[in-house]
Image: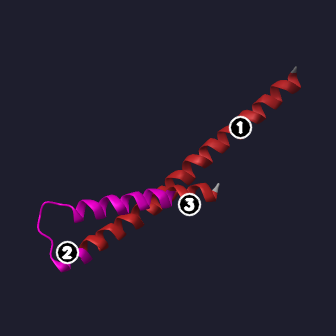
Amino acid sequence: MEKIARKFGFLLGLFTFFVSALVGLFSTESIDFVDYGLIFLKSFIGFSIFWIFGMMTCGIILKIILTHIAEMDIKNKELEEKN
């Protein structure tokens, strides 16, 4: 479960990094040498935020799904025992 959450978070962060970098590099404004550092910095910060956000969100959703599945199994076993 942790591996799925980590992969999802990493992919979400990587997507954010590349989209932010591409938008910054191919904007219609003229770009100076200093702007490349700012574009990279903003992209890296976006990557970090969305990586953490993606891991937390995916972890919570997976935990809810697995808990629901476990509860359904318990209810099904109780129903089978009654019959």
- Asked whether, in this view, residue 69 is left or right of residue 82, the answer is left
Mark 2, residue position: 35
- What residue type is disc 3 on? Arg
Dominant secondary structure, magenta? helix
**Could you say where residue 19 lies in the image, as x and y percent from the top left?**
32, 58
State the CA–CA distance, disc 1 to disc 2.
53 Å
**Residue shown at 37%/59% (left/top)?**
16
**Quarter location, residue 26:** bottom left
Q: Residues within 10 Å of mark 1 (few under 14, many from 20)?
A: few
Which of pointers 1 and 3 indicates the residue nearer the eye?
3
**Could you say where residue 23 lies in the image, as x and y percent from the top left?**
25, 59
80 up-or-down from 61: above or below: above
N-terminal-most mark, 1 or 3? 3
What's the magenta region? Answer: 9-37
N-terminal-most mark, 1 or 2? 2
**Quarter location, residue 81:** top right
Which of pointers 1 and 2 indicates the residue nearer the eye?
2
Q: Is 42 in front, or is 32?
A: 32
Q: Which mark is residue 71?
A: 1
- What residue type is disc 2 on? Asp
**Residue shown at 50%/52% (left/top)?**
57
- What residue type is disc 1 on? Glu
76 up-or-down from 59: above or below: above
Is residue 68 shown in magenta? no
Q: Residues within 10 Å of mark 3 (few under 14, many from 20)?
A: some
Looking at the figure, which quarter contains the C terminus?
Answer: top right
**Could you say where residue 42 lies in the image, as x and y percent from the top left?**
29, 69
N-terminal-most mark, 2 or 3? 3
Provide the secondary structure element on which disc 2 rests. Answer: helix
Which of pointers 2 and 3 indicates the residue nearer the eye?
2
State the CA–CA distance, disc 2 to disc 3.
31 Å
Q: Which mark is residue 6?
A: 3
